[in-house]
Amino acid sequence: MARILVIEDNPASLHLMQYVLKAFHHQPLTATNGASGIEIAQRERPNLILCDINMPGTSGYEVLAQLKNNPGTADLPVVAVTALAMVGDRDRILKAGFDGYLAKPVDPEAFVKDVEVFLRKAA
């Protein structure tokens, strides 16, 4: 069982990811905006962070920068979960420093398998 922080401003997407993670015996932590996600990451030090990119206020890019620039959270793996799926978006996201990329909408059957690949890489 892994503790996985999901930072997502869309309630339906957040609920789906939380539900699927629980169904596969992971412990989801949730944040509905970037600022609270950073606070939770600092306090809880989850095994993995799944972060939306386009959020009001603190974007996923800003979340990533703040986490990676903080010695207490710099080692936490952060995977983008985003609807940005145009040509070049994945490469830009990975080049920005995200440890991985998952496209939305989330496919519940593939989601946990994909997340567990990132967990194994992080271990």
Image (cartoon, rainbow, N blue to C red):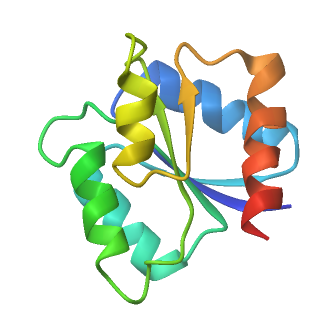
Measuring from the top left, give residue 5's x and y in whole percent: 55, 55
Q: Is residue 95 above or below residue 53?
A: below
Q: Quadrant of the C terminus?
A: bottom right
Q: Is residue 52 visible?
A: no
Q: Quadrant of residue 84?
A: top left
58 relative to 88 in the view: left or right: left
Q: Is residue 122 visible?
A: yes
Q: Is residue 19 above or below residue 43?
A: above
Measuring from the top left, give residue 16's x and y in whole percent: 62, 25
7 relative to 46 in the view: left or right: left
- Of residues 26 and 101, the one drawn nearer to the viewer in this rendering: 101
Measuring from the top left, give residue 109's x and y in whole percent: 83, 18
Q: Quadrant of the N terminus?
A: bottom right
Q: How many marks?
A: 0
Picture residue at 88% right of the left edge, 41% below the top: 24
Measuring from the top left, give residue 25's x and y in whole percent: 87, 49
- Of residues 65 and 57, the one drawn nearer to the viewer in this rendering: 65
